[in-house]
């Protein structure tokens, strides 16, 4: 656990803490035991809980995996009081670490963030966390445009379905992350006991950013569904074209299958001992094939 104190405001950042680490801050700030249990649980739903001396916040923050291209989420637990801020996290999202480094390297930023109280520090932290989502949403929109151009501009569609499904999965994850955060941020700006009135506008700006992302994801959801439907139509059309061609060739070669099959049986058949029967059969099969081929071409079935 690392700590930073400026102008009477303290920020404790706990990355993958043990229960004993959390007991240190629990004894100092008298956190509820159930909140400590929530911090140590594998998964906790986003929420806000109010106590006499602090607020307990649970956020889910999205981040991208460079190895797989998938969007993942990290749970960040925040204890927020009038003169302290405690963050508990796994350390997967880089936003908190960047903010911590920026405060250590810039005295001016440190005095600005801490000098206006813990509420402004919480705002800057949340702003950085949710601003981090914008590149992810923009990446989804870029991928949508790339798939659209590839779908309508190329006959080769290899790997297209996998790309569409991966994109739709990321959209679903982003929507599931942002949906509960909207209510939490809107509820947070009403906590006048902890959030000064002049800071309410700052938190409202965060809410506006989340709403913009939600609007873009709504558009992305509709576009991805349309692209998947278009791709499925393309696959159906290509499959029907292949089946039509194979069926046509099967029908055209049917005389070469039926006639030899009949005359290949070990029974006495008409005209089998007559001269020129073999040549006549060959000529008849070729003629039937030519007629069928001409008919199929005339109907534009081939």
Image: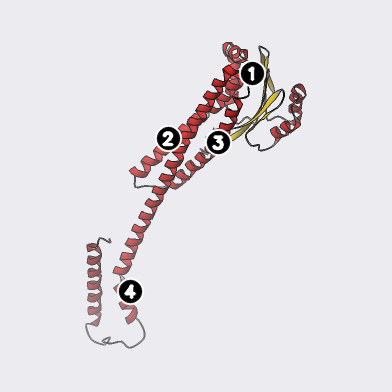
Tag of residue 142 = 2
Q: Nearer the viewer, mark 2 or mark 4?
A: 2
Secondary structure under badge 1? Answer: helix
Q: Earlier in the sequence, mark 1 or mark 3?
A: 1
Q: Nearer the viewer, mark 1 or mark 2?
A: 1
Q: Quadrant of the N terminus?
A: top right
- Few, some or many residues within 10 Å of mark 2 (<14, 14–19, 20+): few
- Left or right of 301 in this view: 189: right
| Residue 249 picture quarter | bottom left
Kindly report which numbered mark, 3 or 4, lies closer to the viewer in this rendering: 3
Q: Which residue is mark 1?
A: 118
Coordinates of residue 96 in the picture (x, y in percent): 60, 25
* Residue labelled with disc 3: 179
Q: Is residue 202 left or right of residue 285?
A: right
Residue at the (74%, 22%) spot, across then down: 29
Q: Badge 1 local density, few (<14 within 10 Å), some, or many (20+)?
A: many
């Amino acid at each position: 656990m690392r700590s930073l104190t400026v102008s009477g405001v303290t920020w404790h950042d706990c990355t993958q803490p043990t229960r004993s680490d959390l007991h240190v801050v629990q004894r100092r700030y008298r956190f509820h035991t159930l909140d400590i249990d929530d911090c140590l649980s594998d998964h906790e739903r986003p929420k806000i809980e109010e106590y006499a001396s602090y607020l307990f916040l649970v956020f889910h923050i999205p981040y991208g995996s460079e190895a797989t291209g998938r969007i993942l989420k990290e749970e960040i637990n925040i204890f927020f009081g009038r003169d302290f801020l405690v963050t508990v996290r796994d350390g997967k999202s880089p936003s908190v670490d960047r903010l911590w480094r920026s405060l250590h390297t810039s005295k001016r930023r440190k005095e600005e963030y801490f000098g206006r109280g813990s509420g402004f520090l919480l705002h800057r932290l949340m702003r950085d966390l949710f601003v981090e989502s914008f590149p992810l949403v923009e990446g989804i929109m870029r991928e949508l445009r790339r798939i659209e151009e590839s779908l309508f501009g190329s006959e080769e569609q290899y790997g297209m379905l996998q790309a569409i499904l991966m994109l739709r999965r990321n959209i679903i994850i982003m929507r599931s992350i942002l949906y509960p955060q909207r209510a939490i941020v809107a509820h947070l700006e009403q906590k006048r006991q902890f959030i000064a009135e002049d800071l309410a506008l700052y938190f409202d700006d965060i809410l506006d950013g989340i709403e913009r992302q939600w609007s873009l994801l709504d558009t992305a959801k509709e576009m991805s569904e349309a692209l998947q439907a278009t791709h499925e139509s393309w696959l159906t059309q290509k499959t029907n074209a292949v089946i039509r061609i194979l069926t046509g060739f099967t029908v055209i070669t049917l005389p070469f299958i039926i006639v030899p099959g009949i005359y290949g049986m070990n029974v006495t058949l008409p005209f089998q001992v007559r001269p020129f029967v073999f040549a006549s059969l060959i000529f008849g099969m070729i003629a039937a094939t030519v007629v069928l081929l001409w008919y199929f071409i005339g109907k534009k079935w081939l």
